[in-house]
Image (tube, rainbow, N blue to C red):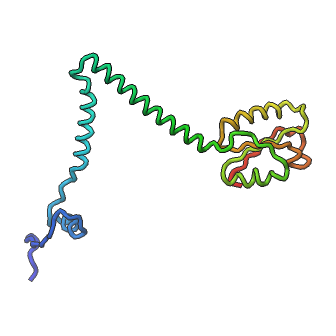
Amino acid sequence: MAAPMDERISVPIDDPNADTEWNEILRKHGVIPEKPPSPTPLIEEAILEGRRLAHENRLEGKDLDELDALEDLEDENFLEQYRQQRVSELAALTKKAVHGAVYPLSKPDYSREVTDASASGPVLVNLTSGLGTNVESRVLTELWRQAAGEFGEVKFCQIRGDMAIEGYPDRNCPTILVYIMG
């Protein structure tokens, strides 16, 4: 004989608060009550609220000398924090700044210094004019030096156009070639 639908069956449970698959199934069907919510978020929220209130009320009941001392302390803390942040930023920039100069190239070095080196980072090549009369080449050469100092993580190279590419016309100089990943 089957049990009527409205009659409850007693199921033995070792620990109703345990996170087991069986307990989840029983909770889903209403056999055992839902697990109470975790108090951790409420505790964390209360701690944050307490810290906020303590920070807001830190000035109450202090005389002028204590307020001056507190202001000096907060200024020192801020400056120290800013200094640490700036030192870490500069350290990161220094670590990235591998090159920082313009590398003059010759034809035999080109493959190693440009193509192979581009596997580890971007390489920019300035093809300059062989003649000293090309004003654009001279202007770009000076800008090239400045950019190399500013962007140390990029390798800046320079070679005469006709040395890099046989028969390369001076009228096409200056030309910038960009190498990334070989």
Rendering coords of residue 142 (x, y %): 77, 32
Residue 171 located left or right of residue 69: right
Front-lying residue, 78 or 7: 78
Residue 32 located left or right of residue 74: left
Looking at the rendered structure, the number of numbered marks drawn on it comes to 0
> Can you name the residue that lies furthest to the bottom here?
1
- Rendered view: 13 above or below 157: below
Rendering coords of residue 161 (x, y %): 86, 43
Residue 132 located left or right of residue 61: right
Front-lying residue, 42 or 51: 51
Residue at image x 53%, y 38%? 89
Rendering coords of residue 4 (x, y %): 8, 75
Residue at image x 26%, y 23%? 59
Q: Quadrant of residue 61?
A: top left
Residue 158 located left or right of residue 146: right
Image quarter in which the C terminus is found: bottom right
Rendering coords of residue 64 (x, y %): 27, 16
Residue at image x 68%, y 54%? 119
Residue at image x 25%, y 69%? 21
Image quarter in which the N terminus is found: bottom left
